[in-house]
Amino acid sequence: MADNVTSLFRSTAAHSPSMAALSRESDGAGPVDFCIPCNPYFPTPAMFEEMASRLRDIITYYPSSADTITAELCSLLQLPPQCVAMGNGSTELITWIDHLLVRESLAVPVPTFGRWTDQPMETGKRVDMFPLQESSGFALDLAQYAEFIRARGTRVAVICNPNNPDGGFLHKHAVVQFMDAMADLDLVVIDESFLEFADAENEPSVVQEAMLRPNVIVLRSLGKNFGLHGIRFGYLVANPALAGRVRSMLPKWNLNSFAEHVVFMLKEHGAEYAQSLHQVRRDRMDMSGQLSSLPGLTVYPSQGNFLFVRLPVGAEGTVVRDRLLTEHRILVRECGNKIGSSSRFLRLVVRPQVDVRRLVTGLEQVLYGTSRRGAAVPEQATGTGYSSGTAAVDRLVSQTNGAGTRGLAQAAGAGMPLPAAVPAPAVGPGGGMPVPAAAGVPQPEPRPVPQEAPRPQPAPQPVPQPVPVPQPQPQPVPQQFPQPAAYPEPAPQPAPAAPPLAPAAAFAAPAPAPAQVPPATGPTPPGVPARGGLTAAQVRGTDGLSMAPATGWPGAQSWPDAAGMGQAAG
């Protein structure tokens, strides 16, 4: 595999070669998979044995119609079948949403799941990409996203909650408020493919609210939740008119016999499924702690079943990915081909502790030079005697008060520029887009690093400690989303029980008056990103909320409802 690993990644149309392709290049056993985000605890071994015993019948005969399989799933989740459409994976549903419901433009924060950017561009739609930056506190500011949508004149808005690849989470009351503010759009899509792994709220899903609104679709995954990516099945929830429009276009046998068999097995295994979600959440907390102990590795809080990590200064993601695979038989997702991300970032799927220990050992050897091939992070000749990753990070922190600068990153041997440490302008070029700004991070001037060795030692000075970015705090002021002039205000809604969103000013510097913003010279041409819409290293972590305790999963004798968290009669 060592000789072919790079060509395997380059030759695939996806972000990574399939497990089947990797197995063919090895001795038949695939690597430990930290790339594909599925549930490692479900189905149970007993369920797999039962499916294996029925394999001949499952693959020999036609499945039932999609209506029959959908009715069984809806009975399990207590959803009305007329509000549900099941697809051969969420990608099939995204494709039909694009063909049927996206007329000319779609807005989406980036980085995110690639089909939300690629699919509309493939059919000639304008995709307005709202960049999410580290300097914003790793949050999707829904008020600024709404302003961006209004400035662009976008007709469809997408939110992934939790977001892929970073696991950023938005509370239910905030999402509902956004849906109502965008009531005049052609469509609002809330992609909840990973929501059942979240524990920040007991009932975070907006499926019930979507069924009551004329322009909202909620997309949900089954393959990811059930650990069965090979069985392509997922579903959407919407009002009967929207769901029926998509359902009427789907082939009669778009769901296979394996999908039918699994759906009809589920009612007997609700307790095992709930326990699997419980264990994934516990593993996520443990894995985050172990990875955070690695010098220079940044781990962003996540509510998905994966963690988004930034490699130390100087580490190149493709090199780390290839060496983990060839030297340690570990497959990871390098995010350089995600719009809005870069090769300094990996997405690592949550796995059992025994696998995580293997991953941590592999990263230590690849990043810090404890293997015979040396470190992936180059080090300057500074006379230090400890690992290159530690030396590079300590030097960067001590010289920049933790903020980092492009010049120091390159001097430390980085193969690519760091994300900018200075705040972006409050208004983006050309599109009137509000861009989040850093709050309270000092921005020191770059200090040149002399090339002579040894370097003169200055008088001892106290080493400044990194100053954390203050986390946004909710304010008791109702969020105001921009409303279109040509549409009436939505009908007043009852006040949510949860605290309202903080105003945009709590996260970003005040934007100049609209009159100061140069108007766009015209609509963005079809099939290209919004003007000024992206930079290579703008990434997102979370909305700044701390991880909640692992509570809120269903009781042992119940099956999770459509939100994945509540109680439903079995």
Image: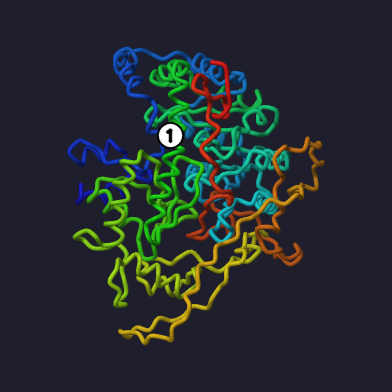
Task: Estimate the x, y position of residue 516 in percent, counting from the top left.
Answer: 74, 67
Kind of element beneath mark 1: helix
For disc 1, the marked residue is: 279
Q: Residues within 10 Å of mark 1 (few under 14, many from 20)?
A: some
Q: Nearer the viewer, residue 418 or 387?
A: 387
53 up-or-down from 441: above or below: above
Q: Residue at x 39, y 18 (%)?
A: 257
Q: Is residue 88 visible?
A: no
Q: Horizontal placement of 58 versus 202: left or right?
A: left
Task: Estimate the x, y position of residue 317 in percent, counting from the top left.
Answer: 36, 56
Task: Estimate the x, y position of residue 86 in percent, counting from the top left.
Answer: 51, 24
Q: Is residue 381 visible?
A: yes
Q: Residue at x 53, y 59 (%)?
A: 134
328 up-or-down from 217: above or below: below
Q: How many marks?
A: 1
Q: Nearer the viewer, residue 164 or 430?
A: 164
**Model colouring:** rainbow
Q: Amino acid at mark 1?
A: Gln
Q: Horizontal placement of 148 versus 9: left or right?
A: right
